[in-house]
Image (cartoon, rainbow, N blue to C red):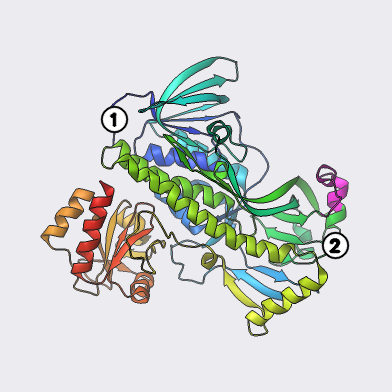
Amino acid sequence: MTHTSQQHRSDFQVVVVGHGPSGAIAVSLLGDRGIRTLAIDRQHDVYDKPRAIAIDHEILRLLDNLGAAERVLPYIAPFPASQHFGAKGQLIRRIDMVAEPYPLGYTPSMVFTQPPVEAALREHAAAYPSVKVELGTELLGFEQTADHVKLHLRDDRGATRDITADYVIACDGASSGTRQQLGIAFEDLVFDEPWLVVDLQVNQGAFGKLPETAAQFCDPSRPTSFIIGPGNHRRFEIMLLPGEDPREMESAAQVWRLLARWITPDDATLWRAASYRFHALVAQEWRRGRIFLAGDAAHQQPPFIGQGMCQGIRDVGNLVWKLDRVLGGKSDPKLLDTYGEERSEHVRQLTSRIKAIGHVICERDPDTAAMRDERILAEGGGVPRTLTRQEIVPPLQTGLLAFPLHAAHGTLFPQPWIRTAEGRRRLDSVADTGWRLVLDARSALEPGPDLQAIMAHLDIRPIRVGPAASDVLTEEDGVLAAWFDRHGCRAAIVRPDHYVFGVASDAGALGMLLTDLAERLR
């Protein structure tokens, strides 16, 4: 689809500043829709050390929709359960992933090796005909007018030039120059702890010295996290104590001293050691005129359930389909206000939950830690209970959702396996994406001619899924049937980012949903 702006003809419809994972995926989402896009980044090359390490099924689903999943799967592995050990070394709880059949058709929690994944995402983004990528290019500044943004660029040879764009997405990291020029402050959600992150490439013969699963050692003398990455990649995150110099603690001598409980220099190669302050920050504004913040430019959270990069990719997944509608003249620009409304609240809620987990892990007082362990075990009836990472991530609760809110509204719509003549396939690959009305084929609910006309106007595709029948998609494991039964509904209107706009159990309720959606998308 080719888009044209209604007024000023800009050089590009969207410029994406920053070509890390969130930026590269934003560019692919834009390119997939035929939107004229420029991606810039000051650096030429992907950083050759791992930083992010966790990814989840929502993100892999998005990559698969783009046709990029196969590029990154060789560098991805399941994220095993994380065992939390208390002050005396006793198991106090586990955080795992939901059991099979998996609700989105993919392993719910995964780990990955960032450098090759990021390189693959960049390669994929650059292949779209409507996309131009300029690495070694810096954004010096910008001005906005009523119908475009003028950006001042400088390449690594010192040459400067100006370009114009309809919109800008700033994915330029935690120290975002775009956010700073806009004068947008972070709201501090009050979490500030110093940690050392250590990545190792472990010799195969030394695996037995390390924990069998991911682990959180909630030891008040030195809280420590252990993560099993793909292949021989292992990560330790070690809390720094008062008086320890963060730069000094990055030295190989200090790293091996801290790891001596588990492993020695003969057992592994030190890949990276970097000190960080784990923060909980959210931008006070996510949009200023035609410029949007996304990823670390908009928020930072502690890493205790591995959601930092996922949050940034959710940002661009939320924003791009809305930009697509506005650039194509299908929706008023006011639709773009729902981006910050939805993502800010979601990030705040998830960050608050991650903070609570972080405070449990980071407790330094031995007496308080002992009481913490007793409380957590009591919550499980005296035995360690298991939480899932998926129940920690909240649904959307505001923005472009049907109100009053139903328990299903704002949740991620399932993706069951579908039986086809060619074999089993995931629902998205059979039914495509975009706006969908998914109907439970076990019911007689069917939109009449008036509702079909609204759906045609909104480009909403009807999809019937149920038991084996000639005129419906047949799901394999009953995932979707169980979802409909659990939520007491027989139809779901699903957004392009796979979040549920609204559900209905009869034709009257469905008509109200479609009428409401038509009005709000104008």
| Mark 2 crowd level (few <14, some 14–19, many ≥20, 10 Å Cα) | few
Residue 67 in sight here: no
Residue drawn at (64%, 64%) of the image: 356
Taking the spot 55% from the left edge, 61% from the top edge, the residue there is 109
Q: Which amino acid does label 2 sit on?
A: Arg
Camera-side residue: 222 or 243? 243
Q: Is residue 356 above or below residue 236?
A: below
Q: Which tag is nearer the camera, tag 1 or tag 2?
A: 1
Residue 314 in the image, given as x and y percentages of width and height:
48, 50
Q: Which amino acid does label 1 sit on?
A: Thr
**x and y, in percent, of residue 99 in the image:** 51, 72
Q: Which mark is residue 37?
A: none
Q: Give how far apart the Cα atoms at labels 1 and 2 are.
A: 61 Å
Residue located beneath label 1 in the image: 4
Q: Residue 210 occupies which quadrant of the picture? A: bottom right
The boundaries of the magenta stretch are 241-256
The residue that disc 2 covers is 261
Q: Is residue 61 left or right of residue 509?
A: right
Image quarter (top left, top right, bottom left or bottom right) of the N terminus: top left
Does the stretch in magenta take in 403?
no
The image quadrant of residue 202 is bottom right
